Image (spheres, rainbow, N blue to C red):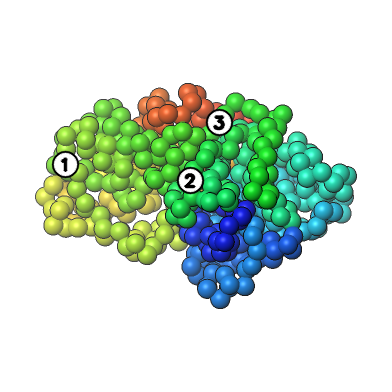
Amino acid sequence: GVFGISNMDDFDTAQITYFGLYALQHRGQESCGIAISKNGEITGHKGIGLVPEVFSEKILDRLEGNVAIGHTRYSTTGGSSVENCQPLIFTYKGGKMALAHNGNLINASKIRYELEDKGAIFQTSTDSEVIANLISRNGLKCSDLVEVLTKTMEVIEGAYALVILAKNTLVGIRDPWGMRPLCLGKIGNSYVLASENCAFDVIGAEFIRDIDPGEIVLIEGGSITSIKSKFNKPHRFCIFEHIYFARPDSSIDGASIYRSRLEAGKLLAIESPVEADMVVGVPDSGITAAIGYSRQSGIPYGEALIKNRYVGRTFIQPTQQLRERSVGIKLNALREEIEGKRIIIIDDSIVRGTTSYKIIQMLKNAGAKEVHMRISSPPVLNPCYFGIDISSKEHLIAANYSIEEIRKSINADTLAFLSVESLLKTPIGAPVNCFCTGCFTGEYPMKVPMHLGKDILEKNC
């Protein structure tokens, strides 16, 4: 998750950024950081852990300035280490700059090799530092910031939502395909940028609009400049944001995440009905779809899984071992609601399958008579190369087994997935045919290098 503010009021810049990052904590729980500019001098603080663990009041009081950017991270390229925490602060010809990045570049390895061949030294293993290095090199050739950023966009390929701090200027950039989200808001006379507009609600800001694909916005001194780059492509927003990643109280590119998930549940009930006594959602991202399924089917919605609110999201834990361990301490079954009943359990996706097995066993151990699993997205068959940690077909259960084989392996009485056709109808209000569905269909918006899946797998392992 990325956040930025150009403070033209009497707000505490660091505290506003802190609360913005808190609202975006669901987008990354490994590390976080803030970079802040005071009279053009950039300083910062970052570390491994959740936002309230990394930042104390004492640390926030030290972060003085009127322009800031922040980042919450879970690793897709580059491991989970202090060196890879963001924002990255670096020096180029125009002075110090800070950068925070959401997404993945598909040509980062190639660019990195070429830059290292020319003498570049890298401190991290992230593709975000590749962007920083390109900006630094382009800054040697020209002094105009827009030209530097445009030249950088000419080279990088893939998914990126960037917030950049250059002296007293706050910059936001969204990739030409619009794969990762970025939006603009305003609080008082101050402009803010964030991955999702739920961050604006927390700080009392008004949502203005989404940043367009390929757009560069520069904010300084209470004024905003928009540059529509020449790199625009057909809009291909990541559909997995609607399925799982984004918060339900966000809207992205005109489509409510909550309504998308509600609609997915309704369509799932139409496509895959089953007789049962109760519909249950896997907390938290399966709950809205479960409500939709219940409303469409007429089967009562019930609370059968109790979540420990102090445990994070299992999908974005950095290792599979941690994911599996998290399930047991994250959820517990409510025997009084379950015993003797036929349960429909709704989840947003099945990626590796281990979590689903544990949840179904939990329900059956609590006395469920039958457990029917319904998934509010299609089978995940392919890797994601653009910023979601779906790394290799080797680890994707649906890429290696039939639906019936998956059903047996997770011990469900029945199993069904939402079709791709229905999934594309769920983001109500979004432009038609504007989504990347590569993880389901194998049809990516751009050509992906053949070696990339192996590279991503090795880095994540």
Label 3 with label 2: CB-CB less than 8 Å:
no
Q: Position of residue 272 (x, y in %)?
A: 27, 30
- In which quadrant of the rendered view does residue 11 lie? bottom right
Q: Which residue is mark 1?
A: 300
Kindly identify which residue carries mark 2: 206
Residue at the image point whose x is 80% and y is 51% from the top: 136
Residue drawn at x 31%, y 49% is 282
Say whether residue 365 is left or right of residue 317.
left
Instruction: Classify mark 1: residues with Cα within 10 Å, few (<14), some (14-19) or many (20+).
Output: some
The answer to whether 352 is drawn above or below residue 30 in the figure is above
Residue 374 placement (x, y as % from top left)? 29, 38
Which residue type does callout 3 highlight? Arg
- The earlier-in-sequence mark between 3 and 1 is 3
Which residue type carries mark 2? Glu
Q: Quadrant of the C terminus?
A: bottom right
What residue is rendered at 27% in x and 37% in y? 292
The Cα atoms of the two marked residues, 3 and 2, are separated by: 26 Å
- Left or right for 251, reference 451: left
Q: Is residue 82 above or below residue 293?
A: below
| Relative height, residue 14 to residue 233 (above, below) | below
User: Is 142 rendered above or below residue 203?
Assistant: above
Q: Secondary structure at mark 2?
A: strand
Name the residue furthest bottom: 58
Residue carrying label 3: 236
Tag 1 secondary structure: loop
